[in-house]
Amino acid sequence: MDVLSDVIAIMRTGRPRSTRISWRAPWGHRFPSTPGSAGFQVVLKGACWFVPTDGPPVELSAGDIVFLPKGHGYGLADSPVTPLAEPPCDPGGVLLYASAVVGGDGAEVVTLCGGYDLDPARTHPILRELPDVVHLPERLGHAPGLRAAVDMLTGEIERPGLGADTLVTSLLDVLQLYIFRAWFGRDADCTKAGWAAALADPAMCAALDAIHRDPARRWTVQSLAAEAGLSRAAFAQKFTRLVGRAPLTYLTWWRLALGASLLRERDVSIAQVAQRVGYGSEYAFGTAFKREYGMSPGRYHRQACPA
């Protein structure tokens, strides 16, 4: 699971946002497409309808979770035929945490919604592999940790106390990790290919953990195969099939993604970043970084941390 922790830490930019909403029938709300972000809805009380841009409406009940990893637009309503109102504000302007009451004076549905801003230049292939809409019915999302994260986050939004900013930010990351765990931990028929299979495979997990634990080490296919407990040929073939990239290609990609994340910090030098991600010189790091990101590390750093 360390790989998932790194995925969350490196992709998110800025602060996440969350809102506990009490919907009163009749109500219908359109959530616009927000490229470069991911969002979620958790039904805390009652039942409602999720209306995707494409496809039929889906009924949601208490305990259901919907995660949208690619920022696609959708609607949420008390009925599949209720018209969807346009959003009254820019979703990017929503606070870290808030509460609201929306709709009329009918039956109540309570949801917890939230969003994360992501850096599209550092999108991990795990996220690309997920479907546009991840629906975790109550039976799949009933893991104790996931429910606890939802309960703690809801409680903090309803009754914010000292340190609420830090707690809510951390709990939103925890919630996203538990959503990933629930999705990738589905039944065996759902984990036979791709990253779901890689994360369920002890040998692949060992190699991925080694890369993420010590990206600066001079890894070779042979040394990574040893971490996985496989022969060089068997490891390279299996890693490429499941992860979608050859071992050293993924290593290079991860080093540069980590480098980009470090360059977003104000008090860091390019030489320090190069060393931390395994490049022997600033020049070598700069050449590789420009090939991947289309600009020099210095320019990337200046754009991320303007004076």
Image (cartoon, rainbow, N blue to C red):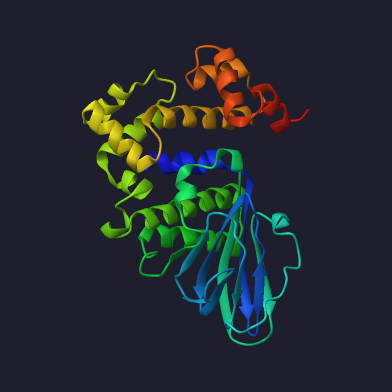
- Residue 45 percent across, percent down from the top left: 51, 76
Give 189 or 200, whichever is nearer the viewer.
189
Asked where in the image residue 178 lies, by quadrant, the reply is bottom left
Q: Residue at x 21, y 28 (%)?
A: 231
Percent from the top left, x then y, of residue 268? 63, 22
- The image position of residue 156, as x and y in percent, is 56, 59
Q: Is residue 195 above or below residue 303?
A: below
Disc count in the image?
A: 0
Observer-nearest residue: 218 or 171? 218
**Residue 47 position (above or below residue 205):** below
Q: Is residue 107 left or right of residue 64?
A: right
* Viewer-proximal residue among 178 and 154: 178
Residue 81 in sight: yes
Q: In the image, what residue occupies the spot 64% across and 23% down?
A: 297
The residue that appears at 46% across and 74% down in the rendered structure is 62
Q: Residue furthest right?
A: 307
For the N terminus, the image quarter is top left
Residue 157, horizontal then vertical, whole percent: 60, 61
Residue 119 seen from this side:
no
Location of the C terminus by quadrant is top right
Left or right: where 83 falls relative to 56:
right
Residue 118 versus residue 273 in the image, above or below: below
